[in-house]
Amino acid sequence: HTLTDVLLVKAGRQREVRRLRDVTRGSAALDSHRRVLYFAREGLAYGLYALSLDTGQVRQVFGAEPNGPAFSGVRVLGDGRLLFSLQSQNHDILSSEFGK
């Protein structure tokens, strides 16, 4: 498991908001107006989550199915809606053979 520390820094002082498990690297998107950090979580159940920077509470926003869809490119729009890429197929190419 990977751990990600979420810290707030103000006037040179830092405060830990929460330690998160299994955050997909590069998936975090900040909504500074609503003070929410959105992130994707990897592992047995992929999903999109929101962390309140005020309370430290995490809530599921979308997904979280075992071996379910993967999220990337999460962006917060001006009106608070989320824009992201959703990969709904979760299988890989196992092998490729080319004619000889």
Image (spheres, helix red, strand yellow):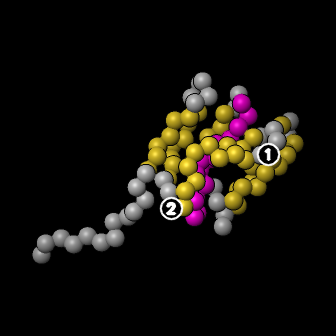
| Secondary structure of residue under mark 2 | loop
At x 71%, y 28%, the residue is 33
Q: Which residue is mark 1?
A: 56
Mark toward the start of the polypeptide (1 vs 2)? 1
**Which label sits in the foreground, 1 or 2?**
2
Which secondary structure is most common in the magenta stretch?
strand
At x 55%, y 49%, the residue is 63
Q: CA distance from mark 1 to mark 2?
A: 27 Å
Residue 26 seen:
no
At x 69%, y 59%, the residue is 21
Q: Which residues are magenta?
A: 34-49
Residue 4: say if magenta: no
Amino acid bearing label 2? Asn
Q: Which residue is mark 2?
A: 67
Q: Quadrant of the N terminus?
A: bottom right
Residue 45: say if magenta: yes
Left/right placement of residue 59 relative to residue 44 reads: right
Decide: few, some or many residues near mark 2? Use Cα within 10 Å; few <14, some 14-19, many ≥20. some
Residue 28, placed above or below residue 93:
above
